[in-house]
Image (tube, helix red, strand yellow):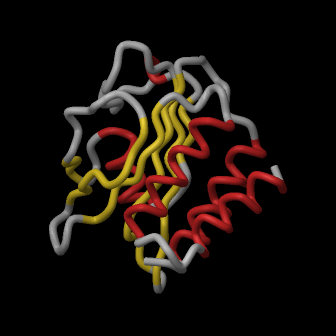
């Protein structure tokens, strides 16, 4: 994981890419390096609205480009301000289905100046794949991402 953190840091610190490009590169790197990350993307607060808007991502296209606060796992994290790990999406009543292949999801909030401004959302085609190391990595990443926003 420390090697992956170094590579993620070098993407975020790169002076030759804009923020959007950096976030897209982060998604690609996570997708390539962690086999059970099958959809990796960012959602951000949509201005003053109580909703999230889809940012850079890697994976199958999604219909969920706008998610109201409270809807689905992403919408819940926008309200709770806490990381949410879902080992089996079929046991989660508030799950918004993006793909029939998705079995698990992890969503980690991004804070800037104490406010929840977005999140990273990762879907997996494997039941209960996410480890405490994954959670720690993603929470570290969201903290690093907040520094470039």
Position of residue 4 in the picture relative to residue 45 (left or right): right
Residue shown at 53% from the left, 79% from the top: 15
Of 81 and 48, which appears nearest the observer?
A: 48
Q: Residue furthest bottom?
A: 113
Q: Is residue 95 above or below residue 26?
A: above
Q: Is residue 126 above or below residue 149?
A: above
Q: Position of residue 36 (x, y in %)?
A: 62, 26
Q: How many numbered markers are drawn?
A: 0
Q: Position of residue 59 (x, y in %)?
A: 41, 32
Residue shown at 20% from the left, 50% from the top: 68
Q: Which quadrant would the C terminus be assigned to in this image?
A: bottom left
Location of residue 50 by image quarter: bottom left
Residue shown at 51% from the left, 53% from the top: 25
Q: Position of residue 85 (x, y in %)?
A: 57, 39
Q: Position of residue 113 (x, y in %)?
A: 47, 86
Q: Residue furthest front?
A: 16
Q: Residue furthest right?
A: 2
Location of residue 33 by image quarter: top right
Of 21 and 149, which appears nearest the observer?
A: 21
Q: Residue furthest left?
A: 49
Of 85 and 21, which appears nearest the observer?
A: 21
Residue shown at 42% from the left, 39% from the top: 58
């Amino acid at each position: 994981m420390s090697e992956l953190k170094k590579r993620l840091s070098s993407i975020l610190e790169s002076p030759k890419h804009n923020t959007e490009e950096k976030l897209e590169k982060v998604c690609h790197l996570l997708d390539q390096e962690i086999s059970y990350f099958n959809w990796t993307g960012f959602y951000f607060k949509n201005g003053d609205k109580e909703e999230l808007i889809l940012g850079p991502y890697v994976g199958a296209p999604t219909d969920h480009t706008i998610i109201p606060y409270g809807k689905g796992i992403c919408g819940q994290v926008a309200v709770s301000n806490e990381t949410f790990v879902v080992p089996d999406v079929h046991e989660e009543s508030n799950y918004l289905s993006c793909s029939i292949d998705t079995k698990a999801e992890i969503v980690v909030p991004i804070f800037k100046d104490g406010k929840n401004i977005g999140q990273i959302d990762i879907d997996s085609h494997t039941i209960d794949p996410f480890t405490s190391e994954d959670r720690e990595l993603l929470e570290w990443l969201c903290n690093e991402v907040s520094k470039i926003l």
